[in-house]
Amino acid sequence: MLYLTPDEARRFLSLIEDEPLGPLYTLAMTTGMRLGELLGLRWQAISGSDLEVRVALIRVGGSWSLSAPKTPKSRRRIALSTTAQKALKRRRRLQAEARLRAGPAWTDYGLVFTDEFGEPLTGSRITERRLRPLLRREGLPPIRFHDLRHTAATLMLTAGVNPKVVSEMLGHTSVAITLDRYSHVMPTMQAEAVRRLDGVLSGRLRVQMRVRRIPRTRKSLDSSVNRGSEMKVGTAYRTPGEPSHASQPSSETTTKRRMRHKKQDP
């Protein structure tokens, strides 16, 4: 698994500001979305401060289609950072310009990321023709497009974001998958946790407890006695008021058996 360090990620974001696919790379690094989810993203799924992953674009042979996301958890809402929102505004402007140039040749699918005629992008065009040459030219690690997703997760976990939140943003089926896949971040997180705990115990770090303590209710001795008085002897497995076995009337068969035993006694 390859990922960019914080310094490399900042360099990368500054390099792609003027790239035609810069908004796509930016959104991948700031949301952790999969490539198919980004290519299937429509403008109608984006609000001001977040977006909803509803479908993913898949290719079979020479055709493409929009299908349900990878797993039920993959259908999710993702908050957009300021960097992501700026990238989307730039993408809308670039698409409007391309639409004017294409004229009648433009095909409107409502997709956010398209080529110069409104058609969906292909993976080879994104990675081989654009991303890798850019990385080689700038001396950055030769990451794949999917490694931008790994970069997003690693940076969030390193920054102390709750793993549960990271798991939800990535669309993992459980937080256990996130913790297992990004276990390389765990030592750093533990060191930071211990540092913060030292700060709390020493008084250098002030925290406000939001947990409300609920006092235990002590049982009254009188109530226990009263409940015991209502129970009859030998009623450990019966509800109060239920007649005991000894108080139940004997059946006719039992009475005849007792009389027969008495006659046989010498």
Image: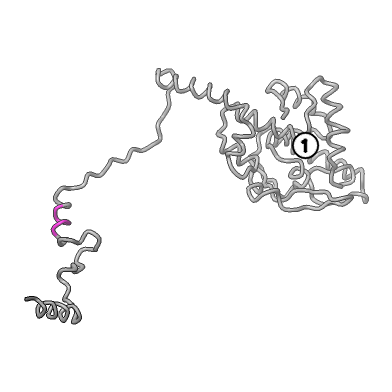
| 12 or 102, nearer to the observer | 12
Q: Is residue 184 shown left or right of residue 236?
A: right
Q: Residue at x 63, y 48 (%)?
A: 73
Residue 146: x %, y % from top left: 75, 35
Magenta stretch containing residue 43, yes or no? no
Q: Is mark 1 on a helix, strand or loop?
A: helix
Q: What stretch is highlighted in magenta?
A: 225-229
Quadrant occupied by the C terminus: bottom left
Q: Residue at x 78, y 41 (%)?
A: 92
Q: Is the magenta stretch mostly helix, strand or loop?
A: helix
Crowd around label 1: few <14 · some 14–19 · many ≥20 (10 Å): many
| 211 or 81, nearer to the observer | 211
Please tell me in which quadrant of the rendered image residue 86 appears.
Answer: top right
Please tell me in which quadrant of the rendered image residue 30 appears.
Answer: top right
Please tell me in which quadrant of the rendered image residue 151 appears.
Answer: top right
Q: Is residue 42 shown left or right of residue 119?
A: left
Q: Residue at x 15, y 48 (%)?
A: 221
Residue 260: x %, y % from top left: 14, 80
Quadrant occupied by the N terminus: top right
Q: In this view, does 193 lie above or below 34?
A: above
Residue 181: x %, y % from top left: 64, 34
| 123 or 38, nearer to the observer | 123
Q: Is residue 194 shown left or right of residue 16?
A: left
Residue type at mark 1? Leu
Q: What colouring style does the render use?
A: one colour
Mark 1, residue position:
24
Residue 139: x %, y % from top left: 81, 19
Q: Which residue is drawn at 48% across and 22% down?
A: 196
